[in-house]
Amino acid sequence: MKKIILMMAIALIAFQANAQQGPRDFQKGNRGDRMGMLQDLTPEQASEIHTKRMTLNLDLTEAQQKQIQVINLEEATYRKTQMEARQNMTQKPTSDEMAARMNARLDHQIAYKKKVKNILTEEQYQKWEETRAQYQKQMKGQKGKSPRNR
């Protein structure tokens, strides 16, 4: 009987210790903390980081890096202004405003994609597309989850 009670007490303590475990720290991959840090970057810093990631992933040449850097800076500046505009909204947009905003965003994405395609080789572009598809799939899977549950 004492053994059973002792085993139950140990199991209860183990469950309690796991239940009180806080969110993972930054080094272990807490995505919410990293995303918050990335939002605080200036457009120049964000574009430089994005260009370096693309260079590592796609093996870009020096000329390609310079061209991509310019495009990524434009993109980061655009994203920053859009994020600030969303934060400054005082009321919910109408359906017409939402449709116009979505169309503008999609037009911007199409233009960005065309610019990148003109710079990259066919193999690099295919790899870039695959990487973007994986990232989008990953983000859709995390949509709606709170940072604490990720």
Image: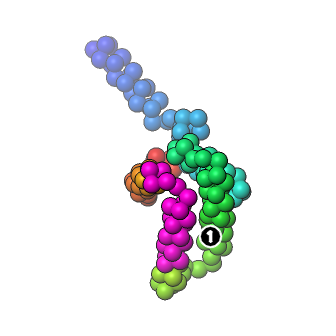
Question: Is 91 above or below relative to 141?
Answer: below
Picture residue at 45% right of the left edge, 32% below the top? 18
Principal secondary structure, stretch drawn in magenta:
helix
Q: Amino acid at mark 1?
A: Gln
Horizontal side of residue 18 vs 45, given as left or right? left
Residue 58 on image: x %, y %: 52, 46
Horizontal side of residue 44 vs 92, given as left or right? right
Horizontal side of residue 77 vs 11, given as left or right? right
Q: Is 24 in the magenta? A: no
Q: Say which of 145 and 53 sits in front.
A: 53
Q: Say which of 10 and 73 sits in front.
A: 73
Q: How many marks?
A: 1
Q: Residue furthest left?
A: 1
Q: Which residue is mark 1?
A: 82
Picture residue at 54% right of the left edge, 43% below the top? 59
Q: Is residue 40 visible?
A: no
Residue 81 on image: x %, y %: 66, 69
* Dot 1 crowding, Cα within 10 Å, few <14, some 14–19, many 20+: some
Q: Quadrant of residue 44?
A: bottom right
Residue 140 on image: x %, y %: 41, 57
Picture residue at 62% right of the left edge, 62% below the top? 71
Question: Is 130 above or below relative to 14?
Answer: below
Residues drawn in magenta: 102-124
Q: Say which of 37 and 123 sits in front.
A: 123
Give the SS element for disc 1. helix
